[in-house]
Image (cartoon, grey):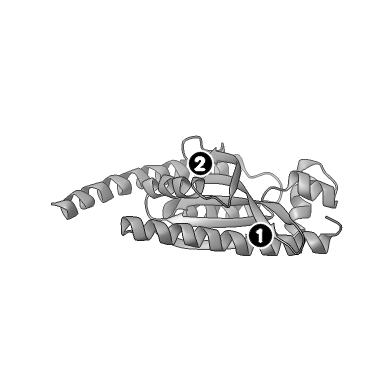
Amino acid sequence: MESREELFLQYKFAKQMLETEINILIEEFVFVHGYNPVEHIKSRIKSEASIIKKLEKKGYNYSLNNIISHIHDGVGIRVVVSFLSDVYDIVAVIRKSKNLIIVGQEDYIKHPKDTGYISYHLNVLVPVYLENRIDYVEAEIQIRTIAMDFWASLDHKIRYKFPNEIPADVKEKMYENSLIIKQLDNQMMHLNDIVNRYDKN
């Protein structure tokens, strides 16, 4: 890797490869199971400003080597599903991929962050096929329910209003709401199980 421009070009290629792979895996799942668990998919390349901010937060200067070593979500894709059980179905599908190499995973559903953040994260290496070589670019896949996505979106907006420290009462309320979201997801999953039993009968 010789330049920032080359890095962001690789990010672009990796994003395209990851989108294609995820879509193929989901289409195959739908074909086999006759059910599409996915509500929507969103992908992005982290902006240079966001990369600089994240490096500073981690205590690193902005350099090509530091980006490669310490930024693991330069490329990101979010898969939003209907029900809690769908999250783990999608995780299982991604694990079967022959093209993606999983290098890390965090189950923030079973072990939420202290902020109340709930989601499932997979860090993968995405092959980028260039003229004379194959490079692997790290990307982050987030899998979450509609309810989790709703909470995370509002949490992000609230945090943006407090550039320094979030007041304790706001932090406490957001955490309480995350517990409500988790409870709602469990209730909706059980309701879906009941509906599926009616379908079978």
- Neighbor class of circle 2 (other Cα within 10 Å; few <14, some 14-19, many 20+) is many
Left/right placement of residue 81 relative to residue 142 reads: left
- Of 65 and 134, nearer the camera is 134
- Of 130 and 191, nearer the camera is 130
- Of 68 and 161, nearer the camera is 68
Is residue 28 something that shows in the picture? yes
Tag on residue 103? none
Dividing the picture into quarters, in which one does residue 81 lie? bottom left
Question: Which amino acid, mark 2?
Answer: Tyr
Q: Position of residue 199 (x, y in %)?
A: 18, 55
Task: Return the residue at label 1.
Answer: 14
Residue sitting at x 74%, y 49%: 54
Q: Position of residue 21 (x, y in %)?
A: 54, 59
Of the residues tagged 2 and 1, which is closer to the observer?
1
Q: Position of residue 62 (x, y in %)?
A: 84, 51
Where the N terminus falls, by quadrant? bottom right
Instruction: Report how far apart the C-alphas of labels 2 and 1 lie in the structure.
Output: 34 Å
On screen, residue 115 above or below 28: above
Assess whether mark 1 and mark 2 are in contact (beta carbons under 8 angstroms).
Answer: no
Q: Mark 2 falls on what kind of element?
A: helix
Question: Which amino acid, mark 1?
Answer: Ala
On screen, residue 155 above or below 111: below
Task: Return the residue at label 2.
Answer: 175
